[in-house]
Image (tube, rainbow, N blue to C red):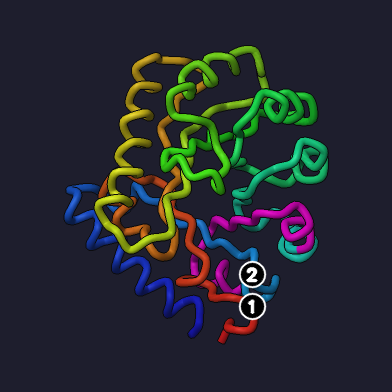
């Protein structure tokens, strides 16, 4: 299907989720995750009205940057190796996977402007998931105060790949509760107003539990070989 048609379904689902949660759909930013599709498909997403694109590898982001330049708002959403920060730091607007001090140091060192970062939190406790333990999240964020080029705009998590709605909601609620605690600390360098959570299979639930940014790939732009 065309991205424009997929986007209509996504926007309808977002609207329904916002009605259930008594939220304004304008609070929700949809990020098209284009890691499995071509630059041409990413361009189609832009033409359909998507303004935010997400990539999880530095080479994938750079390849699409060569074609699309700064037309979209770029989000780096995958695990980021410290040595690869220099490759993408002048291209991205958001980094969703800050999870260690060594990475914070490198971002701060390489950036020539404030970079909007999400602290990635492993709320599910799965060993296969990246992110810091929720119990140390507040202390970790506090330790970022001296990194002048880092702005902690929010928290990010990846929920388990499951159809268990109760489990999914529990994960999303944990991140929302943690966000509330961080906001209450009133850190100027960490306003923490955003929650990046929810993907193709669970974004409606994530929105009902407080997500402000949803990362949607397959349901929006499809996968490699399934772009039409």
- Picture coordinates of residue 103, whole percent (x, y): 70, 30
Which quarter of the figure is the C terminus placed in? Answer: bottom right
Tag 2 near tag 1, CB within 8 Å: yes
- Picture coordinates of residue 227, whole percent (x, y): 58, 82
Mark 1 lies on a secondary structure that is: loop
> How many other residues sit within 10 Å of disc 1, few (<14), some (14-19) or many (≥20)?
some
Verify whether residue 26 appears in magenta: no
Which residue carries the number 2 mark? Answer: 36
Mark 2 lies on a secondary structure that is: loop
> How many other residues sit within 10 Å of disc 2, few (<14), some (14-19) or many (≥20)?
many
Q: Is residue 107 above or below residue 4?
A: above
Q: Which residues are magenta?
A: 44-63
Compute the Cα span from label 2 to label 1.
5 Å
Which numbered tag is attached to residue 224?
1
Looking at the image, which residue sits at the far front? 127
Residue lying at 36% horizontally and 59% vertically, measured from the top left: 202
- Picture coordinates of residue 61, whole percent (x, y): 72, 56
Instruction: Return the disc, 2 or 1, that comes first in the chain's sequence.
Output: 2
């Amino acid at each position: 299907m065309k991205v424009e048609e997929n986007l209509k379904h996504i926007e309808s689902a977002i609207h329904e989720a916002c009605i259930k949660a008594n939220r304004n759909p304008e609070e929700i930013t949809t990020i098209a995750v284009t890691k499995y599709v071509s630059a041409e498909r990413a361009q189609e997403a832009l033409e359909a009205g998507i303004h935010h694109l997400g990539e999880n590898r530095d080479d994938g982001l750079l390849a699409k940057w060569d074609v699309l330049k700064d037309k979209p708002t770029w989000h780096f959403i995958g695990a980021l190796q410290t040595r690869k920060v220099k490759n993408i730091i002048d291209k991205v607007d958001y980094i969703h996977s800050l999870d260690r001090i060594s990475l914070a140091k490198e971002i701060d060192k390489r950036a020539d402007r404030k970079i909007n970062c999400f602290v990635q939190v492993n709320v599910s406790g799965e060993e296969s998931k990246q992110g810091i333990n929720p119990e140390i999240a507040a202390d970790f964020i506090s330790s970022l105060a001296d990194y002048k080029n880092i702005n902690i705009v929010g928290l990010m998590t990846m929920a388990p790949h499951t159809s268990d709605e109760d489990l999914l909601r529990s994960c999303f609620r944990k991140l929302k509760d943690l966000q509330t605690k961080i906001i209450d600390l009133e850190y100027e360098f960490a306003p923490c107003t955003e929650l990046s959570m929810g993907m193709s299979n669970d974004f409606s639930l994530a929105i009902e539990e407080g997500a402000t940014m949803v990362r949607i790939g397959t349901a929006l732009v499809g996968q490699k070989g399934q772009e039409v």
